[in-house]
Image (spheres, rainbow, N blue to C red):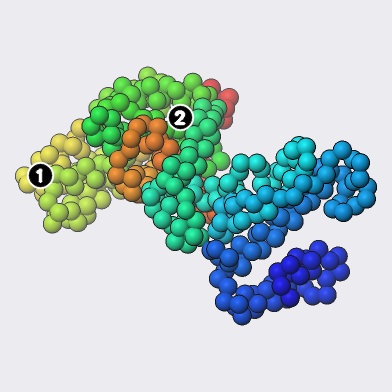
Amino acid sequence: MDLEDAAVAGKDPKPKQSDRELVAKLADQARAEGLELVGENGLLGRLTKLVLESALEGEITDHLGYDKHDPAGHGSGNSRNGKRSKTVLTDVGPVELSVPRDRDGSFEPKIVAKRQRRLSGVDEMVISLSAKGLTTGEISAHLAEVYGAEVSKQTISTITDKVLEGMAEWQNRPLDPVYPVIFIDAIHVKLRDGQVANRPIYVALAVTVEGERDILGLWAGDGGEGAKFWLHVLTEIKNRGVGDVLMMVCDGLKGLPQAIEQVWPRTVVQTCIVHLLRASFRYAGRQHWDAIAKALRPVYTAPTEAAALERFMEFAEAWGGRYPAIVKLWEDAWAEFVPFLSFDVEIRRVICSTNAIESVNARIRRAVKARGHFPNEQAALKCVYMAIMSLDPTGKGRKRWITRWKAALNAFAITFDGRMTPTSR
C-alpha cells in the first residue's frame, strides 16, 4: 500500500482495517523505504501534502459545482485550468503543493490562501518559541535544523508582530470592579535608543475574587522606576473599572504608598517581604546571607506587631554593628511591613510565601536575558507580553493557583467585610 492508496482507504466509508492498523502499515512502509518522520520528503510531510491537495480539490469542486471530468461541467462558463506549484511551510516542514486553478481566475482557496506561504501552525510555533526566550536567529536555526525550512529573521519578526494587535486590545480591556490583592513590580530591560540604557517595564498582577491570577497590564517607563509613573499606572487601572483594591503588595519605593492612597484611599499597602529580604542581602556579605535570613525569619513570622518589634530589636542588637544599613532599611519600611501581621494567618501565608509576582518576573527575565537588548520600546513590550501569555499553556497552573488562594480569599472576605463585592464601588 502506498500513500495514495492510504488516502483512498481513508475515504472508504467501510474501511477494511482500523485507523490504527492503517497508521501501522504506513509507519512500516516508511521504515522500509528509509523515510524520516519529519523534514523534507518525510512521512508526515507527504501525508500533509495528500491531505491539503485533497482539500484543495474539494474546494475547487465546490467552487465550480461539479466533479472533475463530470459532463455536467460542459458549457458551464468556467472549468479547471491545470495546477500551479507552491511550497508552504507547515509544522512538519516545507511541503510542495499542486494548487488547482480555474479558467476565469475566480477560485479563492481557503485552506491555503493565495500568497499564503505558511500554515497557521507554523506561526503559532514561532510565537511559542519566541515566548520561551529564543531569539529570531535561534528560531531560524531551529526551523532549518529540525524541519529543513529556511525562514529569515525578518519573516520571524513579522510573524511575532502579529501579537501586537492582540496586545493593544488586552492592555485596554475592562477590569474587574474589585481585587483582593494586586502585586506591582518593575523589571528592567536594555533599550538601544541612541545608546543602550536601562528602562523599567511596570507589571501589575492581581488576584481576582475567584482566586485566579490576572495580569492587568504592562507599561514601559521612560527612566528609573519612580512613584510618579506608578501613579499614572494605578490611575489607568482605576479608569479601566477597578473601584477598590483591598491590599497592594509592592517594594519599598519612596512615595509609592502615597501614590496608592491617592488612587484607592482604603487600600492597605504591604511591603513585599521577598523584596525586603533581597534588599537586605545587598548590604551583607554572601557568607552571612544564611545567618541573616535565619535571624530575620522570626521578625516576619511573628504572631503580632509587638512580637515582631521585639524580634527585630534582637536582630538589630546582633547584626546592627556589622550591617547598620540593613537595620535602617527595615526601620524605614516598618510602617508598610507590619500591616499583614494583624491579619489572618491565611492572608499572611499567601502574601509572605507564595511570592506571586516573582514567578512571573522569573519568566520575563528569562525571555529578556535571551535578547540582550531591544531596538525600541515596542520590541521590549512585545517580548514581555509573549512571555506572560505563555505562562500556563496547559491550565494546570491555574488550578493550583485557585486551590492555593481559596483559604486566603475566605479570610479576605471576613477581614474586609463587604468590600469583596462590586457593590462596594
Front residue of 224 and 153: 153
Q: Residues within 10 Å of mark 1 (few under 14, many from 20)?
A: some
Front residue of 412 and 156: 156
Q: Residue furthest right?
A: 72
Q: Which mark sits nearer the N-terminus, 2 or 1?
A: 2
* Identity of the residue drawn at 56% across and 52% down: 89
| Type of amino acid at the residue the image marks with label 1 | Tyr
In the picture of the structure, the residue carrying the numbered disc 2 is 245
**Image mark for residue 364:** none
Picture quadrant of residue 379 = top left
Q: Position of residue 289 (x, y in %)?
A: 18, 53
Q: Is residue 274 above or below residue 235?
A: below
| Type of amino acid at the residue the image marks with label 2 | Val
**Gap between marks 2 and 1 measured at Cα:** 36 Å
* Identity of the residue drawn at 71% across and 43% down: 110
Picture quadrant of residue 62 = top right
Is residue 295 left or right of 188 when viewed as pictured?
A: left
Q: Residue furthest bottom?
A: 32
Front residue of 295 and 382: 382
In the picture of the structure, the residue carrying the numbered disc 1 is 323
Front residue of 218 and 1: 1
